Image (cartoon, rainbow, N blue to C red):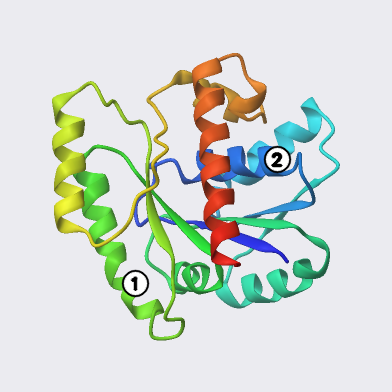
């Protein structure tokens, strides 16, 4: 059965494309993966995929672009018979596309850094999640901490505030503030294929945690 993972947020620059591309690359080691870029016209995932095609062969990884939520629905229906994993890179705004991704996904990831602007953006998307639950009651949306600096007091205070104010679960795996993520992205690679072993360990742990969540949901 096809697994669908959405990556959404109401603000740009929070790491949606970084997370989506890294998960797509590592999942393609296990089977057919389609990365759907809905962040147009910026199209970071599309640029990453184009660069990847020049750097290496990725026979199990494909990319599609969608401009509207109706196009996304049609594309997913066409992909499901022959695709093990679909990963959707959502737009940096509240839109029908965001609602559609929430409804279509088995698991939705909400990247969040320890900054007030990103917390405010996450607060905005809570309303969209509740609206989407009118169409699909069991929407599984979880926070993924990105560019997280656990040693800083500010990061810990922001984390504690989010736990108090948002009724959203968070993944245990946190992605650190590492140059490796931006360098790998620019080269069409994942950090799993890069030189930073700490970043490699983070994305492997994130992939494993997501796999365990999806496996549990299908029991």
Q: Which residue is located at x 20 percent, y 49 percent? A: 162
The correct choice, above or below, for 128 with respect to 36 in the image is below
From this viewpoint, which residue is outermost toward the bottom? 134
What is the tally of numbered marks visible in this picture? Answer: 2
Q: Which residue is located at x 74 percent, y 43 percent? A: 28
Q: CA distance from mark 1 to mark 2?
A: 29 Å
Q: Mark 1 or mark 2: which is in front?
A: 1
* Left or right, 186 with reference to 54: left
- Say which of 30 and 115 sits in front: 30
Residue that numbered label 2 is attached to:
49
Tell me if mark 2 has few (under 14), some (14-19) or many (20+) residues whose alpha carbon lies within 10 angstroms of its own.
many
**Label 2 SS:** helix
Q: Which residue is located at x 38 percent, y 25 percent? A: 177
Residue 157 in view here: yes
* Left or right, 1 with reference to 172: right
Res 215 label: none
From this viewpoint, which residue is outermost toward the top? 195
- Say which of 158 and 101 sits in front: 158
Where residue 74 appears, x then y in whole percent?
A: 70, 76
**Label 1 SS:** helix
* Left or right, 1 with reference to 68: right
Residue that numbered label 1 is attached to:
128
């Amino acid at each position: 059965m096809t697994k669908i993972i959405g990556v959404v947020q109401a603000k740009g620059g929070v790491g949606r494309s970084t997370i989506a591309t890294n998960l797509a690359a590592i999942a393609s080691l296990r089977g057919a993966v389609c990365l759907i870029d809905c962040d147009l016209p910026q199209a970071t995932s599309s640029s990453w995929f184009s660069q990847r095609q020049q750097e290496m062969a990725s026979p199990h990884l494909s990319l599609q672009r969608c401009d509207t939520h109706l196009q996304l629905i049609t594309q997913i229906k066409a992909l499901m018979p022959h695709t093990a994993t679909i990963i959707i890179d959502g737009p940096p705004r509240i839109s029908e596309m965001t609602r559609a991704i929430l409804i279509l996904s088995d698991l939705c990831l909400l990247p969040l850094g320890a900054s007030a602007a990103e917390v405010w953006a996450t607060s905005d998307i809570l309303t969209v999640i509740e609206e989407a639950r009118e169409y699909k009651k069991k929407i599984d949306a979880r926070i993924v901490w990105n560019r997280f600096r656990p040693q800083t007091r500010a990061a810990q205070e922001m984390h504690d505030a989010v736990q108090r104010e948002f009724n959203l679960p968070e993944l245990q795996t946190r992605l650190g503030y590492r140059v490796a993520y931006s360098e790998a992205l620019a080269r069409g690679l994942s950090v799993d294929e890069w030189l930073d072993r700490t970043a490699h360990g983070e994305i492997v742990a994130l992939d494993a945690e997501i796999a365990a969540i999806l496996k549990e949901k299908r029991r």
